[in-house]
Image (spheres, helix red, strand yellow):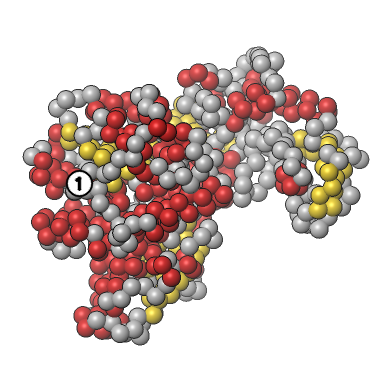
Amino acid sequence: MPTLTVDNISVEVPDGTTILKAAEKAGRRIPTLCHMEGAEPIGACRVCLVEVEGAKSLVASCATPATEGMVVHTNSKRARDARRMVVELILSDHDGDCQTCDRNEDCELQALARDLGIREVTYPGEKSRRLVDTSTPALVRDTAKCVLCRRCVAVCGDVQGVGGIFPQGRGFETVVGPAFCADLDDVVCVQCGQCAAVCPVGAISEKDQIDEVWAALDDPDKHVVVQTAPAIRAALGECFGYEPGTLVTGKMVSALRQLGFDAVFDTNFAADLTIMEEGTELLTRLKKALVDKEEVALPQFTSCSPGWIKFIEYFYPDMLDNVSTCKSPQQMFGAIAKTYYAQKIGKRPEDMVVVSIMPCTAKKFECQRPEMFDSGVQDVDIVLTTRELGRMVKQAGIDFKNLPDGTMDSPLGLSSGAADIFANTGGVMEAALRTAYEIVTGRELPFDDLHVQPIAGLEGVKEASVTIEDAVPDWAFLNGATLKVAVAHGLGNARKVIERIRAGEAEYHFVEVMTCPGGCIGGGGQPRVTTDGVREARIAAIYKEDEGKRLRKSHENPDILKLYEEFLGQPLGERSHHLLHTHYEARAKV
């Protein structure tokens, strides 16, 4: 526990703590640009320079460990001048068209320049070559805005384990992107958007589709409906100044209705539907393995997260049989909206537009997959991220904070608390266990308040087990069996789980994988910046939403039961199989 002095303040910190973190403990904020929570510090941007007595030169506080007796000056003239010059040099090579940039007023470089009192570009001159990449449905890259902070490289390689982008060239010719300056669509990219979530400027962002939504709403011949993912209600408020984790479900519904949507529905309805199908699929696989002695692909992996699906298609195609055949809730909703709901209101599927509000950029890719046209047309037409919805509400001049609380429309708006927790890492697994355990035993899960604590929280890989006792007659073969489950969030952690399974070091029956750290609440399309503190606040809000629901289990949703009675027949039935299930295929790695 070395003790050092930061701006005349004595502070004791654990061994290995950086000067940056020591300064935070002392109540001093040092500006940064390349620093990212949870990533190895690289000191690339040099914005966090400080003066250390006895050192020959200024040091990068994010990458320099604090030592016993160290005396640090974070606000000396030498440090301030150096930081200012560094930011001025970055601005000299940055496309500074802030007025039309989607990061205007949400840009870390803009904020740095303002805080440092920079009012003009001191070093005008030649700028790096511009490359704009619009090749994917989800993301847009603009190298003219890149500040070479390498955050995107760290999150893509170290956190997600994909490695689709990295620095190339030297000096003025340095560029961050796919190999050989290829487009993102030509390399292994799962379009998760974590690069856009951590980018401090507008160099990588989601592909904006707000104008497409306005065009649909303005078309009198179109019946436009919207679905909202569970994670949105705990994050959208941040776009309007609310604290992270503030639930704005009712105001969100009212805002969407004022935007002009013909019906406002809830992806949670389809999440309950997903549990019915995916839980039945798991129990069917277990029956085939234990009773019929058939070769069955176990463990079963969840299929709700499109970035994860693309990841396994690229890196582990031999394990695709282990992935549930269920579509994601977004896609199930689209298929049901353009068939069951369309019939109820007397509309043709081609006269409907289904818009999704998602925390995820990969959903923009998912809705365009060729497997997602089972309603006869494209099941989901347009996907907006949380950030895009926030911008759209502001475009419409809606006073979000003073909106009354609205309620979802029927029949695709009722949901259980189990559907809400789909937003959190471990939530899909917990929702599935609530239903599967009760179907098999006739009793609720033997956990406090239905929460399976071992799979909650932000640990990268979590495990739990549930022993079946006194099963009902139809499932008596499971008596004494212990169901082993695992949860991974962040694709790097998913890789660890798969490698352990392959090596015979772990044995599971069911595995949940979420692409983004924290689950959907930490999605690539959520308000920036998503730290662990923000994730925890959003997670707590989602659990609060669940606990406040009258219905807590998917199989108790009366509108889901009515859907099966009137339209689908039964889980895994012929119509369910056609509309709600799909298959995935190996992708060649470039």
- Residue indicated by mark 1: 410
Please state the horizontal and vertical placement of residue 352, each as a whole percent of the image: 17, 36
Q: Residue at x 34, y 30 (%)?
A: 209
Q: Residue at x 26, y 73 (%)?
A: 439
Placement of 173 over or under 186, stated as above or below: above
State which quadrant residue 342 falls in: top left
Please state the horizontal and vertical placement of residue 44, each as a whole percent of the image: 68, 37
Q: Residue at x 49, y 38 (%)?
A: 242
Please state the horizontal and vertical placement of residue 443, each as a whole percent of the image: 30, 76
Q: Residue at x 35, y 24 (%)?
A: 396
Q: Residues within 10 Å of mark 1 (few under 14, many from 20)?
A: few
Q: Amino acid at mark 1?
A: Ser
Residue 469 in sight from this viewpoint: yes
Q: Is residue 138 left or right of residue 224?
A: right
Placement of 38 over or under 284, stated as above or below: above
Along the line of sight, which residue is nearer the eye, 175 or 19?
A: 19
Along the line of sight, which residue is nearer the eye, 105 or 449?
A: 449
Please state the horizontal and vertical placement of residue 425, each as a whole percent of the image: 45, 57
Q: Quadrant of the C terminus?
A: top left
